[in-house]
Amino acid sequence: MLRVHDKVDNWIVEIIKDDPVRPELSADFRINENSEMFSLWDDSGLGAICCVRYTEGIPASIEQLQEKSNPFADTVVFYTIWSYKKGCGRNLIIEASEHIANRNPEIKNFVTLSPKTPMAEKFHISNGAWKYRVNPETVNYAYKLQE
């Protein structure tokens, strides 16, 4: 079951400590008027977590992720994901993308702001994304793009 987290609470503050990609980002960075977190659950518990930011255009860095944040966004940026169970990260990307597309038809671009690691590349490419742009410190993988 997909859950949308749009309020900071004690559970959020604790769970983000498990983030292997961007643990330095605060709960308030992850959940605000332009950001939310998603979690995927099954009968045995928590499977995966991801954080997204709504932007105008595709950012190349965390700084641009903040600068391009916009309530009239055309892009959703998956900037961190972590999984507690095999396969749940992939399923979370799919379910969160479907939820966002149904709720926000103005969103045209579904991209990542990923670290430059072989693990990130393998994860995104094997899940149907393609390398859109290599930035100085990150890579944008695109799942759906209509720039």
Image (tube, rainbow, N blue to C red):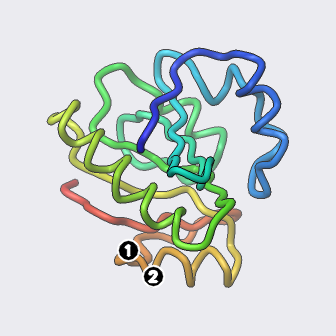
Q: Image quadrant of residue 120?
A: bottom right
Percent of width and height locating residue 100 = 29, 39
Secondary structure at numbered mark 1: loop
Q: Which residue does the image show at 46% across and 30% down from the upper left?
A: 4
Q: Does residue 73 sit above or below 52 in this rendering?
A: above
The amino acid on which the numbered mark 1 sits, given as a three-letter code, is Ala
Horizontally, is 10 left or right of 31 in the view? Answer: right
Residue at the extreme front of the image, as rendered:
43
Question: Are there few (<14), some (14-19), or many (20+) residues within 10 Å of tag 2?
Answer: some
Residue 130, placed above or below residue 145: below
Query: Looking at the picture, how far across and down is residue 127, in whole percent?
Result: 41, 76
Query: Horizontal and vertical percent for residue 55?
Result: 41, 35
Q: Are marks 1 and 2 in contact (CB under 8 Å)?
A: yes
Query: Real-space Cα distance between discs 1 and 2?
Result: 5 Å
Which label belongs to residue 129? 1
Residue 33 at x, y percent in the picture = 48, 15
Residue drawn at point x = 52 percent, y = 63 percent: 88
Q: Tell whether 109 sits left or right of 62.
A: left
Q: Is residue 10 above or below residue 97?
A: above
Residue at horizontal 70 percent and vertical 16 percent from the top: 9
The quadrant holding residue 119 is: bottom right
Identify the residue at image location x=36%, y=19%. Answer: 71
- Quadrant containing the C terminus in the rendered view: bottom left
12 left or right of 55 in image? right
Considering depth in this image, is 11 or 16 the residue closer to the camera?
Answer: 11
Residue that badge 2 annotates: 125
Amino acid at dot 2: Ile
